[in-house]
Image (cartoon, rainbow, N blue to C red):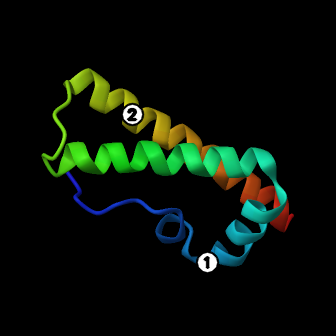
Amino acid sequence: MSHTPHELHDVFPDDGDILHQLKLDNGHFQKLSDRYHGINREIHRIETGVEPSSDDRFEDLKKQRLAMLDEIGQMIKATTA
């Protein structure tokens, strides 16, 4: 179990400029990014013991985060293609 937050700039370290531009220009990305950060913070609070959670809820949150990372990765790829 990792206690390190999975911030987007850490997950996509070579794509900081693209992430910034998407945040400025793409409303869907803005909402997705905000939702990702909210879920990511909740996962981090659970991992560090600040917030209790059932195993099912914790796994569901991690699946949501992964799905959002996949979508964000596709958006980055589409921007660089």
Residue beneath the point at 16% across and 34% down: 52
- Percent from the top left, x then y, of residue 11? 49, 64
**Above or below: residue 64 compared with residue 79:** above
Location of the C terminus (image quadrant)? bottom right
**Above or below: residue 10 compared with residue 70:** below
Seen from the viewer's position, the closer of residues 15 and 38 is 38
- Percent from the top left, x then y, of residue 57? 30, 25
Seen from the viewer's position, the closer of residues 69 and 21 is 21
- Residue assigned mark 2: 61
* Secondary element at tag 2: helix
Amino acid at the residue labelled 2? Leu
- Residue assigned mark 1: 14
- For label 2, count other residues whose C-alpha is less than 10 Å away and answer few (under 14), some (14-19) or many (20+): some
Seen from the viewer's position, the closer of residues 6 and 51 is 51
| Numbered badge on residue 45 | none
- Percent from the top left, x then y, of residue 24? 78, 64
Judged left or right of residue 66, residue 74 is right
- Percent from the top left, x then y, of residue 78? 82, 56
- Which of disc 1 and disc 2 is earlier in sequence? 1
Judged left or right of residue 20, residue 60 is left
Count of numbered circles on the image = 2
